[in-house]
Amino acid sequence: MLPGFRVHDCVQDSYVVGRDRRADYVLGGAGGEKSLIYSKRHFRIYKEGSGAFVEDLSNNGTFVDGLLIGHKRKSPLTNNAVISLSYEKNRVFVFTDLSGETLEMPTALQQKYALGKTIGTGVCGEVKFAFLRDTMEKCAVKIINKGNFKSEGTATRNAETEIQILQRIDHPCLMKTKDFYQTEESYFIVLELMEGGELYYRIKSKKQIPEDVAKFYFYQMLLAVQYLHSQGIIHRDLKPENVLLSSQEDFCLIKVTDFNQSRILEEAALMRTLCGTPSYLAPEVFTAASTDGYGLSVDAWSLGVLLFVCLGGYPPFHEQFGTSVREQVLRGSYTLLPKQWSHISEQAKDLVQKLLVVDPSQRLNIEEALSHDWLQVRLMYLRVPPPQAQGEASELQSPPPQAQGEASESPSSGPMRGLSVPPPQAQ
């Protein structure tokens, strides 16, 4: 910061900086004719959502880290960003973000993206809000610390698995990587920003997802998993925390994410490792993980649990129901409580019951689930790309107004966070 300029604490949402005495911060500190190089209203610094920005109001130029913003254009601010006025070498201010810890990042990442506050945390790292500097496009950066799990390189293996899958997949209902960087300490995965947040929080706020909305989400989940299976990939950790919504609207695009538990099948090999979230694990994962192994059907079971939670508002398997989650899953023991399920259609219940079948050979597979009567709704096929068009589709169409009348990261184990569970005696 140049001598003669004072420190200013930005506690309000917006400040105008310039020569005009009516500005929130008056540029007169340099004194004399020098101050005439500044405009009366030179720039505005403001907060929007989770980020800080500078808008150039001058004809003389405002620079952030040596880059000219341009009149009436804006630029995101990151911690320790240098603001220059009128010409690049006239470095007047340094923006200091006191909202969180600083992180050493690759130079190429910093030049291309501006990172903001943390918007999610998980076992392997955190997710930060970010902007593409050139276009101001919003995105998210998942940061995985390689040193978090030093035992047998678990974090590194999980991160590399996720990166490999993200770079390989291409489907509108699956999260895809936009960029990738790494340092000796961390991986940085640039992803699309899903502004609707996790399906988990949507369920928690609504208690139960309206059936037509749940159907819309579930159809997209099936398409996503169908694509993964066609690529020889088992997700293995399908749950509401790993389904992201594109907006706050009920009918919106969803994307399945978090592939660090996934495995890519080599030929017809079966999985033999126990991983995923216990209350969403298929019975064969508990019984066959160390013997015969398990296959694609584990994802169909997890989707059955997910659909149950969306429609019923509570998990089918939970420790509060008396026995352990493992025992409940192995027996396929769950209850459709009348209070939560009386208004749900018989077709929806039938699909849930046919997915939550203990014997994987008798359980519906993904293609059979897609063909179930509950999902044969013409309007849904207009909203969601049909299976044969998945590779070409990039977004979903909005539903007609008359159809809307009815209404980054979580630990990989443990029950659902904070969802209400009916009292055990009601079971």
Image (cartoon, rainbow, N blue to C red):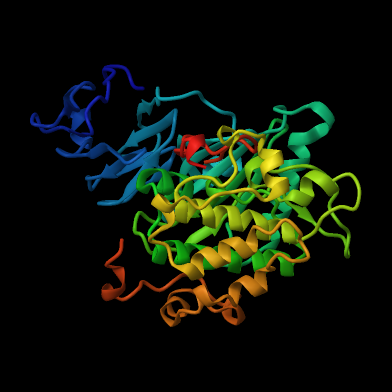
Q: Residue at x 35, y 35 (%)?
A: 84
Q: Would you say 300 lies left or right of 103 here?
A: right
As drawn, which residue projects farthest toward the front? Answer: 425
Q: Is residue 95 above or below residue 270?
A: above
Q: Is residue 279 above or below residue 296?
A: above
Q: Position of residue 214 (x, y in %)?
A: 45, 61
Quadrant housing residue 392: bottom right
Which one is nearer the viewer's eye here, 175 or 400?
400
Which one is nearer the viewer's eye here, 29 or 378?
378
Q: Is residue 177 in sight in this rendering?
A: no
Q: Would you say 26 lies left or right of 104 here?
A: left
Q: Position of residue 36 (x, y in %)?
A: 18, 34
Which one is nearer the viewer's eye here, 41 or 348?
348
Q: Would you say 90 lies left or right of 267 here?
A: left
Q: Is residue 389 above or below residue 217?
A: below
Q: Position of residue 329 (x, y in %)?
A: 68, 46
Q: Position of residue 222 (x, y in %)?
A: 59, 66
Q: Number of callouts in the render? A: 0
Q: Would you say 103 lies left or right of 296 here?
A: left
As drawn, which residue projects farthest toward the right? Answer: 291
Q: Is residue 135 in sight in this rendering?
A: yes
Which one is nearer the viewer's eye here, 355 or 380?
355
Q: Residue at x 60, y 58 (%)?
A: 304
Q: Residue at x 41, y 79 (%)?
A: 379
Q: Is residue 389 above or below residue 240?
A: below
Q: Residue at x 35, y 54 (%)?
A: 248
Indicate the quadrant containing the N terminus: top left, top right, bottom left or bottom right.
Answer: top left
